[in-house]
Amino acid sequence: MEDIIKVEGVCKAYGDHKVHEKLDLNIKKGECFTLLGPSGCGKTVLIRLIAGHETPDEGKIIIDNTVVADSATGEYIVPERRGLGIVFQDYAVWPHMTVTENVAYPLKMEKRPKAEIDQLVQRMIEIVGMKGLEKRLPSELSGGQQQRVALARALVADPSVMLLDEPLSNLDANLREEMRFEIKALQRQFGITVMYVTHDQEVALAISDRIGIMDAEGKLRQIGTPYEIFERPADLFVFKFMGIANFLKANKNAGKWCVGTGSQEIPWEGPTGNAAEWVCGFRPSDVAINREGQGLKGVVKRSNFLGNTMDYLIEIDGEQLRTEVETHEAITQNLMFKEGDELFITFRALHWFDAAQLKEVEEF
Amino acid sequence: MSYIRLVNVTKKFGDVTAVNNLNVELGKGECFSMLGPSGCGKTTTLRMVAGFEDLSDGEVWVGDRLLSCPRKNHYTPPEDRNFGMVFQAFAVWPHMSVYENVAFPLRLRKLPPAEIDKRTKDALQATNLTKAANDSPADLSGGGKQRVALARALAINPDVMLLDEPLSSLDPHLREEMRFELHDLQKKYGFNIIYVTHDQSEAMALSDKILVMKLGVMQQIDTPLNIYNNPANKFVFSFIGVSSFTDVEWRGTQAYVKGSNSPLPSGIIVPDRMKGEEVFNLASRPSTIKFTTASDEMGVPGQVIRKAFLGEIVDYLVRVGDQDIRVQIGRREPGPEAGEGCYIKFLRPFWYKANED
Amino acid sequence: MAKGTIKQDSGFGVAQLILLVSILVLVIFVAWPVLLILFNAFFVDGSFNYRDFYAVLTEPETFQALKNSLIIASMTTIGSTIVGTFFAWLVTRTDLPYKTFMKSLFLVPFMLPSFIGALAWKMLLSPNSGYINKFLMDMFNLQEPVFNIYTYMGISAVEVMYLFPFVFIQVCGALERMDPTLEESARISGAGLFTITRKITIPLVMPSIMSGALLIMLYSMAHFGTVAMLGIEQGIYNVPTLIYEKIHQSGGSFESIRTGTVLATVLVVSAACIIWANQKVLSRGHYQIIGGKSFRPMELKLRGLRWPLLIFCLAYIGFTIVLPTVVIFLVGGVSTYGLPLTWENLSLDNYKYILFEYDVTRDAIFNSVALGLAAALITMFAGVIISYVIVKMKVRGKGILEFLGMLPFSVPGSVIALGVILAWSGQFGINLYNTVWIILVAYIARYMAFSLKANSAALEQVHDSLMEASRSCGATMWQSLKDIVIPLVRPGMISAFFLIFLPALRELTVSIMLYAPTTRTIGVAIYTLNEDGETVMSTALAGIALILIVVGQTLINHFTKKAGE
């Protein structure tokens, strides 16, 4: 499919702080692309570069086959002529305008006929579920409602791309969950390209067609579908960033890979490749625990009831791992462990990583 | 013999009853959490125990000391209760060093200097603050500040530790870490904890006993597992964890999910107390529903209207009749695709009357 | 997509133009006059000469004026700090009855110009003819008056009465914003209320107390009105009154201007020191004491002292506000100063006369209103542009503007007046001296600080993303300014307008140095009429001024409340 946004070799620095160096990124027409990374990794800067609130020091940005910024030629198109819709983290709805006035503003700027504006605004307000609140001022709306206004305003003028900059992070957990599905539904309904920026991996997994993972230095580590990113992480950084991760140090003992400094063999195929030291990584759901049977023998160091799940900290030969068992399952399958209980562990999936990467990641 | 006793504790603000006739008995060294939505009276209760609010009626006892009893016109001021307290906004004094913050309550007790020094250092040690003793609290992170508050409360060796949403100003990962530290400290020092929070998993993880409150009225007081497994009513069920309430109606002697053409399968037994109700609720949690096949005698037919891959779990919205039900399965479990028909099985259904709340 | 390329950062754009204009405004109105003062203080006949500077400083007269400024300012500061902190604590941390009402009462002294207060106190407590003194002497058959207002003590006491709200407001704000759990945690640690006040509350609000105290110090050092009203008779001069006296007596001779510039330099330097100290106090002591769930803070139960303390507060207000105001209106109603204040002697004749017949006062009222309106409008618009550059724009060279923007805050009124004389009396081609324009120029310089403060505060509230959102919605920069920024800062602009208009209405320090026979302002007219022995007329005009001020203040409150809704 055709690329609607192309970022080519973009560099951006603030003083000595280099945010982006030679960044390349393509976003396909009609997809929902999420840029996921820790705070301070430069994702917001990238959005601002695309929107035109910043100019690249080097490189080129192309939207819909039009060069909007090019350091080589000095070409630069002002934000209002880039045809984008933007939703900000702090909503940025104008406090002195009613819901209707906020949503109508982009159409007024396009000088559309009044009847058309009224009709489009009314329709948009209905779509985002704000009917009946048209006359309200933003101060009379909740955070979630303000963000709906911001969404309506960004969509109403039929932009080629909608940019969303952490739009949910000021909302509470329940609302966040609800809104992410709504954003996804809007994207489907309008068939619009979405570029979404966040540090919350769950939102990214839930709404994206593709995800780009950016590290704290602004480097893209992996781009792929949610499933690829989660199941086939390119490296340890990606693996760790996508959810709770356990790492066990391994040593080679008489040709077998064993946990920590002990002699229990890890029941999984060993690593291939060159690394001085190896760690194996896995998610809590990759672990199967049993009262007896095969596998690595461990001891429960801490047992925590968290409502939906039981949370166990398990020690195996000096190495620790955490796993969770769904409460109903734990009760019905005799998996309610107390501190000090012994148990046996097998794996459903396991990834090998260079131990040097672990040190690098821990320094963050 | 119970150590802390709240007897018929009631608090009125004008016409509003913030806490209504609350009775709680706690053993020595127990960790007790009060859970509920904002405005349920949990913070007011904590402040009454601390002595910051007067009671309208009732008694508060700790050990054999009566602390508050308006009928006997008896009231021990907070400074004489020998409690420790940690607040949501840290409340460390910014004009004193970390050491001075912790030593302050000991100085007020006019202890000999050597003992003040020893106990301050012990408390700092217990909270991993030894290195930061001479720092200004302003230089510490949120977690650091909350440790100072904790050390300050520990130093006096309190009978009861009162915690008012102590973790909610912290980052999620720090929150978990501090929760474990708190647990370890309690084990080590053996004080009672009274904990106020709106985060149910925090309460579950930490407490021996949980009180769920709503609009000043006690809903259930029990162990975490019982609260989760045997909620006393619909409110408690919905407050603990994510929940779906599915409307079910009688058509003749058969129960149907609202809008559905097929009756609930024979494997699902509707309790007798729902007889005579026009509409009632089948309550479930997303994680206690599994996908099954048509041959399962507990399988309810439906259609997947949304599927979202969330990493560890896959989140579904399944439509049965005109009702939407949340289902979550592990990422390794097999499940249908969006738009497909499916059968779901309620592993642990709860039943509530529709008008109950 | 419409293709339109605009080169960025290429030479001289709109942003640079606005910046340049802003810098020019501040330089012409503020920086240049101050520089001229410094230049004239240190350069004699074009060469640097610090000996002369030193010689002028050590003349007995000037040295005494400096000492007096310091003595009066210190006494005023200490007094106001104690009074302001005490009342602030009383209305925020105790169960004093009618607290909210009392809090607004304690802000009333802000409205009363201190020189009008001084005028009233002069009539009440002057040793020869003060009403209270006469009353007491008659009553107890005394030979000597009991009180003498013409002393350091008297001057400072009057200043305290009208300046303490500076501390009161700061401390009230700090106490109200303070997280109550800071005190509660001390309580549960075992501290009683008295210990908490001493060890926790007071130390935590100390930065606010200090900052209020320094503001008063700054104000009092350079304060003209009260000292002029009460001091000159006994030969007590402070820096501003001496500058005025010198220049006034000599008709603007070189010698007097020179003495003036030397004294003004000392004022500028001390003001700069005070501002610097204030920044220091605020930044170092800027404790994070806000936050958390808000509960009512603990209240000290006053028990038996509740009503006596309320009566004390009311008595204080009655004594410092009501009594002087009543005296002003009564004396303004008698035909000759000194007549007993009885019903038969009172009439509205004086008020009629000064409003409709007496050209001096009629002109003064017109001048003050016109000057106030003009200064407020000009400064409001200039202020919003300059603040916009400082707060919102990213242009190189903004640092200069930030520095210049600080300047108006630290230049006392008498210094501005002197600088304006130096700058605008013909040496540089334009002679505004003896016209109303020179007063306008000085007002703009003096009140720029207020406008910058109000407008920057309003602009800080307008988050950048609001403007970026409108750009993304297809609005150009100018459209965004018009549709988004201006509507949002309008309340700030309106409050800046009133913040300037009302003080300008009663201004004395600057106008007294610059007035000509036909360009008197209300303040000048009150002062000079009083000087000339027209006590009754002067007082009646003061009464009119008070009415104008109260009406204006009521309007402000109305507007700001509306804007806040």
Image: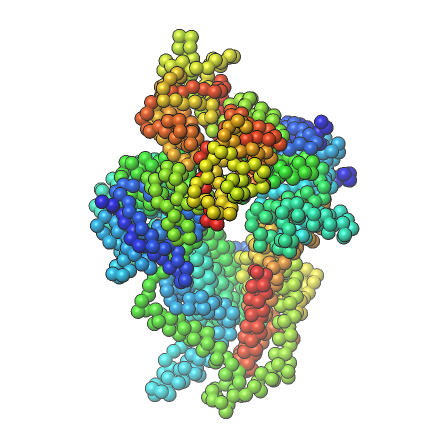
Q: Does residue B259 appear to the left or right of B197 in the view shown?
A: right
Q: Which of B135 and B46 is in front in this view?
A: B46
Q: Does residue C192 appear to the left or right of A41 in the view shown?
A: left
> Residue placed farthest to the front in the image?
B252
Is residue B157 visible in the rendered image? The answer is: no
Image label count: 0
- At 31% from the left and 26% from the top, the residue drawn is A340
Q: Quadrant of residue C174?
A: bottom left
Q: Nearer the viewer, residue B19 or A100?
A: B19
Residue A307, horizontal then vertical, whole percent: 41, 36
Is residue A323 visible in the rendered image? The answer is: yes
Q: Is residue C408 above or below residue C153?
A: above
- At 48% from the left and 69% from the top, the residue drawn is C109
- At 34% from the left and 40% from the top, the residue drawn is B223
Q: Which of C349 and A53 is in front in this view?
A: A53
Residue C350, horizontal then vertical, whole percent: 57, 85
Q: Does residue C171 appear to the left or right of B252 in the view shown?
A: left
Q: Is residue A176 above or below residue B299?
A: below
Q: In this view, does A2 lie above or below C373?
A: above
The colour scheme is: rainbow
Residue A364, horizontal then vertical, whole percent: 48, 29
- At 43% from the left and 82% from the top, the residue drawn is C130
Q: Does residue C124 appear to the left or right of A106 in the view shown?
A: left
